[in-house]
């Protein structure tokens, strides 16, 4: 029963994430066609939504010390095709080790993260792990050991969510969406109830967003 509840919880979490992603992708498709959004403020200014849309897809399935996730390559290919159809340029990586995983994020950020009118999407599918204190989460590369057997080795090779948060704050791109198809527990992801009515958006579209 506990396992069923965890699966159901993960399913609904992913469902919400995918809805958010599809909303963003629809905007990206419009941006790739040169559509401009008119900001309904006091000046009636018309602004371009995005100049470029770039996606980084990372999937880890062939683990050395963790259970293998056989479905990930096919799932990543579907996500890639959907993004290409929406006008994104897509960079895809399968089964990076610890050093490669960090380099992939840094190189992508260096290439596309400092253009103010860019839209970025980051998608990671693989194992995730939360520290027993519940406040530190990690993405698990293919060579990371089991933290219950080699905690020091795991921390050396895994990618901390705090580092990803730092990169998100460092980026200059207008909008960035991070999607993690991973099992986490604890408090590294905290949710808040949505307002009864969404806030007025208008000019906020032109401001930087990290989600």
Image (spheres, rainbow, N blue to C red):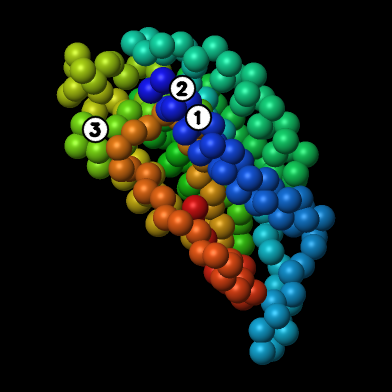
Report if the CB atoms under discs 1 and 2 are less than 8 Å apart. yes
Q: Residues within 10 Å of mark 2 (few under 14, many from 20)?
A: few
Is disc 3 placed on a helix, strand or loop? loop
Q: Quadrant of residue 47?
A: bottom right
| Front in this rendered view, residue 59 or 69 | 69
Q: Earlier in the sequence, mark 2 or mark 3?
A: 2
Alpha-carbon span between mark 2 and mark 3: 23 Å
Q: Quadrant of residue 40?
A: bottom right
Is disc 1 placed on a helix, strand or loop? helix
**Residue 33 vertical placement versus 143 (above, below):** below
Determine whether, in the image, residue 145 is placed left or right of residue 66. Answer: left
Q: Is residue 116 visible?
A: no
Q: Is residue 30 visible?
A: yes
Give the residue number, with chain letter if any, for mark 3: 131
In percent of width and height, residue 108 lies at 51, 42
Tell me what residue is drawn at x 34 percent, y 11 percent. 65
| Front in this rendered view, residue 188 or 50 | 188
Give the residue number, with chain letter if any, for mark 2: 4
Q: Earlier in the sequence, mark 1 or mark 3?
A: 1
Tell me what residue is drawn at x 67 percent, y 60 percent. 50
Tell me what residue is drawn at x 56 percent, y 61 percent. 174
In percent of width and height, residue 199 lies at 56, 70
**Badge number at residue 8:** 1
């Amino acid at each position: 029963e506990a396992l069923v509840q965890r699966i159901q919880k993960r399913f609904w979490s992913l469902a919400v994430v995918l809805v958010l992603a599809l909303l963003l992708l629809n905007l990206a498709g419009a941006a790739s066609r040169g559509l401009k959004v008119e900001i309904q403020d006091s000046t009636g200014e018309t602004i371009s939504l995005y100049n470029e849309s770039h996606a980084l897809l990372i999937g880890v399935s062939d683990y050395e010390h963790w259970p293998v996730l056989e479905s990930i390559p096919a799932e990543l290919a579907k996500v890639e095709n959907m993004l290409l159809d929406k006008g994104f340029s897509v960079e895809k990586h399968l089964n990076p080790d610890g050093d490669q995983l960090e380099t992939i994020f840094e190189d992508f950020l260096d290439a596309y993260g400092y253009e103010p009118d860019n839209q970025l999407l980051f998608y990671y599918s693989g194992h995730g792990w939360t520290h027993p204190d519940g406040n530190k989460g990690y993405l698990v590369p293919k060579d990371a050991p089991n933290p219950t057997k080699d905690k020091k080795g795991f921390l050396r090779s895994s990618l901390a969510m705090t580092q990803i948060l730092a990169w998100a704050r460092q980026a200059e791109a207008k909008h960035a969406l991070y999607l993690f198809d991973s099992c986490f527990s604890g408090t590294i992801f905290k949710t808040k109830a949505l307002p009864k009515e969404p806030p007025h958006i208008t000019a906020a579209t032109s401001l930087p967003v990290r989600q």
